Image (cartoon, grey):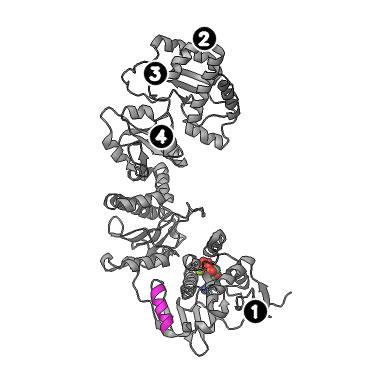
Amino acid sequence: MPDTTAPQKFEFQAEIKQLLDIVIHSLYTEKEIFVRELVSNASDALEKLRHTQITEKEIFDDKLDLEINLTTDDKAKTLTIQDFGVGMTRAELVENLGTIAHSGSKAFLKALGEGGAKNSNLIGQFGVGFYSAFMVAKSVKVYTHSWRAGEPGQLWESDGSGSYAIEESEGQRRGCKIVIELKDDCDEFAQEWRVKEILERYSAFVSVPVNLNGKRINTVQALWLRSKNEIKDEEYTEFYKFQAHAYDEPRLRLHFSADAPLAINALLFVPKENTEKLGFARTEAAVSLYCRKVLIDAKPKDLLPEWLRFLKGVVDSEDLPLNISRETMQDKALIEKLNRVITKRFLKFLDEEAKNRPDAYNEFYAEFGVFLKEGAAIDFTHKEQITKLLRFESSLTEKGKTTSLADYVSRMGSEQKEIYYLVGPNRAAIESGPYLEGFKARNLEVLFCYETVDEYVMNHVREFDGKKLTAADHADVKLADLPKPEGALSEDDTKTLIAWLKTALGERVAEVKTSDRLVDSPVLALNADKSMSPHMRRMMKAMNKDGESPVRVNLEINPRHAVFKRLFEMHTAAPAKAQLVAEQLLDNALINAGLLEDANAMVARLNKLLETI
Ligand code: ADP
Ligand code: MG
C-alpha cells in the first residue's frame, strides 16, 4: 500500500506543460481574467453540489452555505478563493487538474498549433480555465474536501513548472479553497480594491453570493428578469460571455417575456460564429432552464428542438413546479409546451430581423443557415415558418445576393406552377451547364443550391405556398414550347437521326429525344432513373452506395445546333466517324451532368477524332 498521507509527486500531462509554459511566459496584459476563471469554477462546483443534494442523502459538511468567499492579504501577498461546492477527491485532483479535460484549453492549444504561436492574446479568446492562475502565481495550493463523507481532505500544490504534489490534509471544509501566492509583480491582486473591481466586472451574474473580505459583491438581479429598457448592451454582452462561457460577442439577441400560455422570461443569444462550421464537435444544447432564478438544468436536452442547438441563454418559467429537478424533468408535457412557445417566438424574431435588418439577417444566415435548413427538413411542426426564412441565390439575383421563396413566388408568372432549383457546386458551374438555358429562354427563375444538404432539404420541404419545389434537371419537367427556331434540322431528318443515335449508343442510353430545354448547347443528359437526379447520383457514388450499376441516361438533343446538321450528313457519308462523334456528344453531356465515369476512354476517342481534322 502506498502511503497516501505523504506528499506524492506527479508530472503534468505533456499538453498541460505546454499550456503552462505559454501561460506563464506570455506577456498577456489582461492577467485579471484568472479571477473570472476561478470564480466560474467555484460557481460550477456549487451548482453541482446543489444537484448532488437532490439525489444524495449523505453529504459531507452539509450545513455550509452555497457561497464563494474571496480574501486578500496584502502583507502575505496572497489571494484566496473558497467555495463550498462539490470539492475533489485525490483521484479527481489528478484527473481534473493534471490532465487536459477543459475544452477551452484544448481549443486554445489547437489554435496555437494552427499558427497562433506567440499570440498570447489567444488566451483572452479561449480562456484556459484553472491554469490561468499561473499567470500571476508563484505557487497555487488547492485545499479540498469532496462532498463524499468517506474521503479524506487533500492538498494539491504546484508552482506550475511541470509537476505537482498531492498529500492528505486534515481539517478541510467541503469544497475547494485555492490559495494563490502572487508573483512580486502581480501583488496588485492582493489589494481589495483591485479584486473588487474585477469581481464587479466579471462576476455580477454568478447566481450564488460572492463575498470579498466578508462583504457581498454581486447584488445584481438576474438579468433576464429585469426590464429590457434599463439594460445596457454591455451588460447583455457580459452576461452572454459569463453564461455561455463564451469569448466572442453575441450576433443576435432576443429578450422577451410572456404570460400566456406559460409565464416565461427568456434571454436568447446567437453567437458570432458557428463552431460546427469551424470543424469543432457538434454543438450541445446550452440554453439553461431556471425556475424563479434557481437553475434547474444547465443543458436541458428537450427545451428546444435539436436544430436550435446553436442558441445560448436562459429560459426562466414560473410555471415549473418548484420541486422540479433533473429527474422530474420527466414532466414532458410542460417542457414540450415551453419548447413550442419559445421556438415559435424565436422564429418570429428571425422573421422580423429579416424584414427590419436584412443585412444582419443575411450575415446570420450565411453563418447559421445550415441549422435552419436542418429544421425545415426535419421539424414538421415548424416547417412552414422555417421555410420562409430560407435564402438562395438564383438566376435572377446577383452573385452573392439571395432571395427568399416568398420573393421568388411574387416574381412568378401566372403560367408557372412550380418553383425550380438546380444543385451544383457553385454559381459558375450551374450557369455554364446546359440545364439552365431552357429556363432562361422562358424567363423562368431558377434557385441555385450550392450545399450538399440542399437537395435533401428541397426533397423534404417539397413545397412552398402550394407550389412544388422541382429540380430543373429532373426528367419530368415539362416546359412550354418556344417559337420554332430557324435553320433547325427538319422533323423527318431529326427522327431519322434519333433512330440512328439510339442504335449507335445502344445500352448507354435509355431514350433519345429532341429537347425542349436546350437553346445554345447541343445535348444534355437526364438521369433515366427518375427517382434520382444527377446530383443525387453523384452523392450516392461518392458514398459508394450505387455499386456497379452503369449510368444509363436519357439524351436530349438540340436539332438547331450546327453539330446535328453535320452529324446528319455524316451518319451516312462517314459512319465510322459519325459513331465517334455521337459517343463524344454523349460523354460531353455526361460531363455536364457530373456523371462521366471513364474519362480515359473518352480521351482516347477524342484523340482519334482529332486525327481526322
Ligand atoms: P473547466 O472549468 O472548463 O472544466 P478548468 O480548467 O477551469 O476547466 O477546470 C478543470 C476542472 O477542475 C473542472 O472541470 C472541475 O472538474 C475541476 N475544478 C476546478 N475548480 C474546481 C472547484 N473549485 N471545485 C471543484 N472542482 C473544480
Ligand atoms: Mg473553468
Q: Amino acid at mark 3?
A: Arg
User: Does residue 547 appear left or right of residue 535 in this picture?
Assistant: right
Q: Amino acid at mark 4?
A: Glu
At a point 57% along the width and 13% down the height, the residue shown is 576
Q: 10 Å neighbourhood of mark 1: few (<14), some, or many (≥20)?
A: many
- Where 220 sits versus 364, above or below? below
The mark lying in front, picked from 1 and 2, is 2
User: Does residue 240 appear left or right of residue 600 in this picture?
Assistant: left
Q: Amino acid at mark 2?
A: Ala
Q: 10 Å neighbourhood of mark 2: few (<14), some, or many (≥20)?
A: few
Q: Which circle's residue, 4 or 1, is located before the other in the chain?
A: 1
Q: Secondary structure at mark 2?
A: helix
The number of numbered discs placed on residues in the rendered structure image is: 4
Is residue 56 visible in the rendered image? The answer is no
The mark lying in front, picked from 2 and 3, is 2
Separation (CA) of disc 1 from disc 3: 90 Å
Q: Which residue position holds label 1?
A: 167
- Where 609 sits versus 97, above or below? above
Q: Which residue position holds label 2?
A: 573
Residue 281, position as x, y percentages in the image: 52, 54
Q: Secondary structure at mark 4?
A: helix
Q: Which mark is residue 431?
A: 4
Q: Which circle's residue, 3 or 4, is located before the other in the chain?
A: 4
Classified by dominant secondary structure, the portion drawn in magenta counts as: helix
Residue 457, position as x, y percentages in the image: 42, 40
Question: Image quadrant of residue 60?
Answer: bottom right
- Magenta range is 193-203
Question: Image quadrant of residue 393?
Answer: top left
Q: Is residue 200 magenta?
A: yes
Whether the residue carrying mark 3 lies under 8 Å from ligand 1 is answered with no
